[in-house]
Amino acid sequence: MLSALDLAQSNLDEARQLRAAGLAYRAIARRLALSPSQIAHIRRGLKRTRLRKADPDADDRALPVSQSVLPMDLRRRLLEAGFLSLGDLADRIAQPDLPGLEAIPGFGPHRAHRVKTLLDQFGMLPAGPNDLRAQIEQLFPELSEEHATDGVRLAPARSSRPHSR
């Protein structure tokens, strides 16, 4: 079961793909079975990422943190820490000499994960020694996303001990 934040993020990802395919917001709301407030959140989230309308030559690295789809409190903390664009965040994560985002006051692993997820969506998350998914896919190619339709999934390990009551 997904948490509310993970569900909202997955809805936003699906809506972004459907919107890129040319569907109207009303059709997206019907297809994903979204409430009016959920589709309003998606509409706001997708508007924040429309940087190319203002500057056609801009890339994703130039997207201001204040216009990203991150929650308001997280955007405020990033701005206070001096990160003005997604490129600034990607540069900070890519530098192995600097501590991670968790070292920023008021940040924790959950907020750092949200930022890394956003950077991964834009393809700005550097693949390095900390990229566990890439290492697993290198060792087990059948678990890569290209083979996701094969039905191979990781299942949780089952305990061999009987349940005690």
Image (cartoon, rainbow, N blue to C red):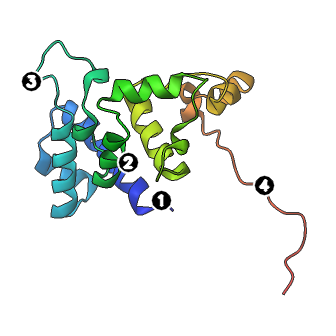
Q: Residue 54 carries which label?
A: 3
Callout 1: 10 Å neighbours few (<14), some, many (20+)? few
Residue 117 location, quadrant: top left
Residue 128 location, x and y as percent?
61, 22
Q: Which mark is residue 2?
A: 1
Residue 40 location, x and y as percent?
15, 55
> Amino acid type of disc 3?
Ala
Pick the front one: 153 or 151: 153
Q: Mark 2 or mark 4: which comes first in sequence?
A: 2
> Amino acid type of disc 4?
Ala
Callout 4: 10 Å neighbours few (<14), some, many (20+)? few
Q: Is residue 37 above or below residue 138?
A: below
Callout 2: 10 Å neighbours few (<14), some, many (20+)? few
Alpha carbon distance from label 3 to label 1: 35 Å
Residue at x 46% of width, y 53% of height:
106
- In the orientation shown, which residue stands out farthest toward the top? 57
Residue at the disc numbered 4: 157
Alpha carbon distance from label 3 to label 2: 27 Å
Residue 127 location, quadrant: top right
Quick check: marks 1 and 4 in contact, CB under 8 Å?
Answer: no
Q: In this view, does 45 lie to the left or right of 120?
A: left
Residue at the disc numbered 2: 10
Secondary structure category for the residue under label 3: loop
Q: Mark 1 or mark 4: which comes first in sequence?
A: 1
Callout 3: 10 Å neighbours few (<14), some, many (20+)? few
